[in-house]
Amino acid sequence: MSETGLRFSGVVDHLAVKCSDLNKAVQEYKKLGFTVETLYEDWAMMRDAKGFGIALLPPNSKHPPHIGLRVETQEELEEAAKREGRPIKPHRDGTLSFYTKGIDGNVIELIYYPPDFGKKELSKAS
């Protein structure tokens, strides 16, 4: 634990929930006002107007249901991963993160979004 007694800190970035049909779930979240940030065959990230995310996990997803906490710097992520004894994994969307157990076995993902996150996708769309 750090000097403050906290294992790590961050803001809630997203909740990752199971879904039975990814395409149908994406359409339903769009009706609620969410937009698609990332869409792959095995998961999707939806965001509301304020930036809160819902990660949709179909049956073939390798991601566990979890609470995603966003940290502001890569250094914060590295320090937390070291304290937790977890490896940091780069993701295909450009983020870096690690999973660890929370309270009562609920999985927590600490995630870092680099400054250029999303710019590659924007340049592809242009």
Image (cartoon, rainbow, N blue to C red):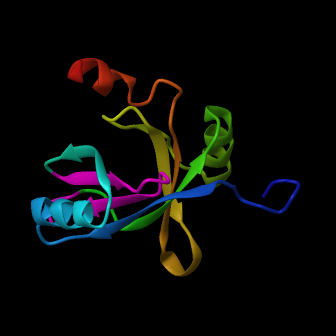
Residue 48 point in image, percent of width and height: 40, 56
Q: Is residue 28 above or below residue 89?
A: below
User: Residue at coordinates 18% horizontally, 45% vertically from top-left?
Assistant: 40
Whole-percent x and y of residue 27? Answer: 16, 61
At 31% across and 24% down in the image, what residue appears? 122
Residue 89 location, quadrant: top left
Residue 78 or 71: which is nearer the viewer? 71
Residue 110 on image: x %, y %:
54, 51
* 88 lies left or right of 124: right
Outermost residue toward the bottom in this view: 104
Q: Which residues are magenta?
A: 42-61
Q: Which residue is nearer to you in this view: 84 or 93? A: 93
**Most distant residue in the right direction:** 3
Please tell me whether residue 39 belongs to the stretch shown in magenta.
no
Position of residue 57 relative to residue 80, above or below, is below
Residue 104 percent across, percent down from the top left: 54, 81
Which residue is found at the position 69% from the left and 55% from the top? 8
Left or right: 59 in relation to 98: left
Which quarter of the rendering shows the C terminus? Answer: top left
Q: Residue drawn at (61%, 42%), measured in percent from left and top?
A: 77
